[in-house]
Image (cartoon, grey):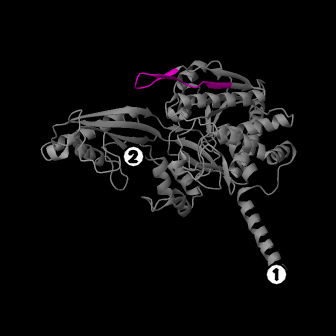
Amino acid sequence: MDPTLGNMASCQLALLLLLLGSMSAPSSPPAGLLGRVFQYIDLHQDEFVQTLREWVAVESDSIQPVPRLREELFTMMSLAAEELRRLGASVDVVDSGSQKLPGGQTLPIPPVILAELGNDPKKATVCFYGHLDVQPARQEDGWLTDPYTLTEVDGKLYGRGATDNKGPVLAWINAVSTFRALEEDLPVNLKFIMEGMEEAGSLALEELVRREKNRFFSSVDYIVISDNLWISQRKPALVYGMRGNSYFTVEVKCRDQDFHSGTFGGILNEPMADLVALLGGLVDASGHILVPGIYDHVAPLTEEEQKMYEAIDLDLEEYRNSSQVKRFLFDTKEEILMHLWRYPSLSIHGIEGAFDEPGAKTVIPGRVTGKFSIRLVPHMNTSVVEKQVERHLEYIFSKRNSSNKMAVSMTLGLLPWTANITDNQYLAAKKAIKTVFGTEPDMIQDGSTIPIARIFQDIIQKSVLMLPLGAVDDGEHAQNEKINRWNYIEGSKLFAAFFLEVAQLHINDRNSPA
């Protein structure tokens, strides 16, 4: 290659890297303790990735209720407990009892870890919640690599649980271990609560939180959860709200046995036809929910909230491409975000009893059950929604004049969660993000539901912060889940900076006049 061309290419590459860096990192590393913390994390990042590799290797699937996977969950909880003990934390491994399965058999529920590190009354106490269980994953389902072997490709760390939630849990531990390695005093007292059944509904966790309210949680000032994603691939975010969820089943039954369509087709009301009509009457092609009254209690849009949507940095084309969809129902950033976060949505999930195998089986199902859910927003009420849905489905069914029987049931009712973004820990998180990434965070909501946030807020009555580390394309719950090495390592720095910012705000509050 011509040396001149080589020099030009090098200059162009350096300029490009400089521009990219200016978009996502501060212009110069911080001085003092934080600078040494950041340096240590950079120098030891391969060790941190190796620990994540060891955690991902544990098949801690809580969804499939089989003894082998329960053993894996117990192994995962033991690994985490040992990691916390190495930090010097006092660790209480709390027995969670057993789970009774539909067939009558029982399986043990993995224990919940309660750990404490520091009890200085002059310091703020921050509690971190994380879960160590994962969704099922098999390579034959479309994974490009073994889902339980952490594989790095182009700076992306692929593996089940990498972003949901083992990576963020370890990033928090990495931050703590860095202060320990540098023999520096932790700026805050720390508590940890870690579970192994979040993906399966956090069995027995709410009862434990209530029981420990006046003991383990009595000194907690702030609670941090890192179990979400950014809205961007490169720009960090803070989450201040999540939708709730009402999950429904609707059963249509003629008899318990299936029918032969040649013998019975054309002379009876087919349950599947009834069910398809019921499900089809729930939502229209534009995503508008057809249940009368469902929007009556939705919180009105305020001018301040409108400005927050406008300020969010979202590239619609990038978002659409990363989502791998042809088009969305709405054309503007604001419309899409509002329908993801501040308006309810209805999703149809599946049908039990229907023939869904390959081939051409000419059967009329005798009984079928449809499953759907409504994501709730402030100020919707689960009991009101339940009655509205029941009335609407009963009306549709009555118009069909069917001889079949219909039964509607709400099997889950979880309320939405909203945080106060003026709380100290949100201010601390904003400052920490500015320090680590050189930018203000997007202030976002999350369309999904994390019940533990509402449980903490209602029972312990302390501020809950959602501080995500993952990028929008991490693919939590999907094939080829990953966390970027950059997010994992910079996230470890973010938590360290957050400790220092919380400590400073706590000192300022103590010293301010009453």
Q: Relative to residue 188, is residue 292 drawn left or right?
A: left
Quadrant assignment, res 228: top right
- Furthest residue toward left: 267
- Picture coordinates of residue 410 (x, y %)? 36, 33
Q: Relative to residue 461, is residue 249 drawn left or right?
A: left
- Circle 1 SS class: loop
Find out whether residue 490 is within the magenta segment: no
Amino acid on which disc 1 is placed: Asp
- Picture coordinates of residue 467 (x, y %)? 64, 42
Look at the image and give the residue range highlighted in magenta.
Answer: 98-114
In this view, the residue in front, 214 or 168, is 168
Find out whether residue 106 is within the magenta segment: yes
State the CA–CA distance, disc 2 to disc 1.
59 Å
Quadrant assignment, res 131: top right
Q: Which residue is mark 1?
A: 2
Q: Label 2: few (<14), some or many (≥20) within 10 Å? A: some
Residue drawn at point x = 37 percent, y = 41 percent: 372
Amino acid on which disc 2 is placed: Ser
- Picture coordinates of residue 141 (x, y %)? 50, 49
- Circle 2 SS class: strand
Quadrant assignment, res 129: top right
Q: Which mark is residue 347?
A: 2
Q: In the rendered view of the protein, which quadrant contains the C terminus?
A: top right
Residue drawn at point x = 53 percent, y = 27 percent: 67
Q: Relative to residue 383, is residue 450 drawn left or right?
A: right
